Image (cartoon, grey):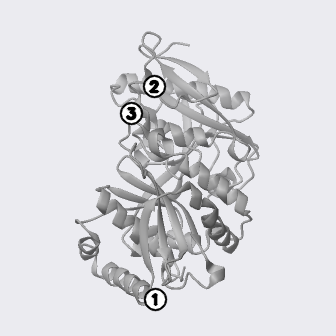
Amino acid sequence: MTHPGPFEVTERDRLDAHRPGEGWLDEHGFYTCRRWTASQEGDRGFDTAYLVGRSPHDGRTGGLVPFHTADGGDSNPLYNEATLLGRAPGVQVLAGSRTGYDNRVLLDPALDGADRTALLSALCDRLLDRAEERGAGHVSWWYLPEAAARELAALPGVATTAAPCLPTAVLRPRGDGLDAHVAALPASRRSLVRRDLKRLAAAGYRSRTVPTDPAALEAYAPLVVQVQVRHGEELTEEGAVRYLRRCLSLGGPAAEGTGTGAPGDVVVTEVLDPTGRPVAFALGIVHGRGLHMRVFGCDYDGGHGGHGEYFEATVYGPLRHALERGLDEVHLGVTSYRAKSLRGAELRPRQTLFMSRADRRPPAPAPDWSFLGDDGRFLAGASSEVLPC
């Protein structure tokens, strides 16, 4: 194989969390940064490896492609090819980000057009080799921005098909405080947000956003379990604590070089009842200029959740924190699209790209998001009214 410019492609089974001069790898986004990617290794039965385009002269990395292999696909239908192909996958190979609903092509932004194309082509050529060795005829790149999907589809020697994927909801702070932000929203959004805030205040609730305290995780766990039960999923309190600890491990020095190394990178917005007891919370992780919301919990069993606690924990409290810290975005993730849109979020389109060699036909997409209920209907243009959360 010939190598583009000064780079050669090698495979590794572990990811270097830090290498001098490679901070750009973490600047594409939180869900493609090295620490998040490494934290998913071995999760849900996937085998993860990394293709690295690196200079043999100085060790400089020019490109990186994580890839994740599992028999039978992902247990999460939002990442399982069966959702988009209408059939159960055999061996599924996911390229780039495997979780988090955002993906990127990880190439050094200093590369010019020709070297960029050559290195990306070499990485994808090796990627398809590895997929075939594992018994898969194609690879899939999930939750790609449209520009990234176009760049991959234009590579020589590959065949691709694309399918719309779930969009990601992002809230952009406006103004210099919550009042200014609300005033900048369209009139219909303004009145809804103000009603939310008045309803919460009238019931005596308030919120605060604080750095995550490791000693508080066991108190949050039962609230997470109650939310999962309402969604028909099984989770133990021990499992919830493990996940919260994993989230906590992603803050602080782990995000070095991305502007996020300060204390408080993993924050919790607590909703307090009139007695001052936390009855709902949402955990978020600051990366670069964005706050990424990851976990919500609520004490439904205690009679809470009917006064707007969900939106205070996941939208308004995090928005206040973003405004105070001068952050550019609050990433609200996927699902609950109508509710998030009505409260000022924009939906950014994402695509899944299926890639095979040029002499093989990639699979034909047949997406089915109907299992999402209201979200599926909203995305299809026939949404129901907002339901209480």
Quadrant position of the N terminus in the picture:
top right
In the rendering, at what x and y percent does residue 122 appear?
Answer: 52, 23
**Measured along the vertical axis of the image, is residue 165 above or below residue 315?**
above
Q: Which residue reaches farthest bottom?
A: 202
Q: Earlier in the sequence, mark 3 or mark 1?
A: 3
**Measured along the vertical axis of the image, is residue 206 above or below residue 168?**
below
Q: Earlier in the sequence, mark 3 or mark 2?
A: 2
**Measured along the vertical axis of the image, is residue 382 above or below residue 257?**
below
Q: Which mark is residue 24?
A: 3
- Tell me if I can see residue 54 in this picture: yes
**Residue receiving disc 2:** 19
**Measured along the vertical axis of the image, is residue 368 above or below residue 43?**
below
In 3D space, how far apart are the residues under numbered discs 3 and 2 (Cα atoms)? 11 Å
SS for callout 1? loop
SS for callout 2? loop
Classed neighbour count for the residue bearing mark 2: other residues with Cα under 10 Å, few (<14), some (14–19), many (≥20): few
In the rendering, at what x and y percent does residue 248 appear?
Answer: 54, 50
Seen from the viewer's position, the closer of residues 360 and 60 is 60
Residue drawn at x 28%, y 56% is: 326
Kindly identify the amino acid type of the residue bearing the numbered disc 1: Ala
Seen from the viewer's position, the closer of residues 99 and 41 is 41
Q: Which mark is residue 203?
A: 1
Residue drawn at x 69%, y 40% is: 42
Q: Earlier in the sequence, mark 1 or mark 2?
A: 2
Q: Nearer the viewer, mark 3 or mark 1?
A: 1
Classed neighbour count for the residue bearing mark 1: other residues with Cα under 10 Å, few (<14), some (14–19), many (≥20): few
SS for callout 3? helix
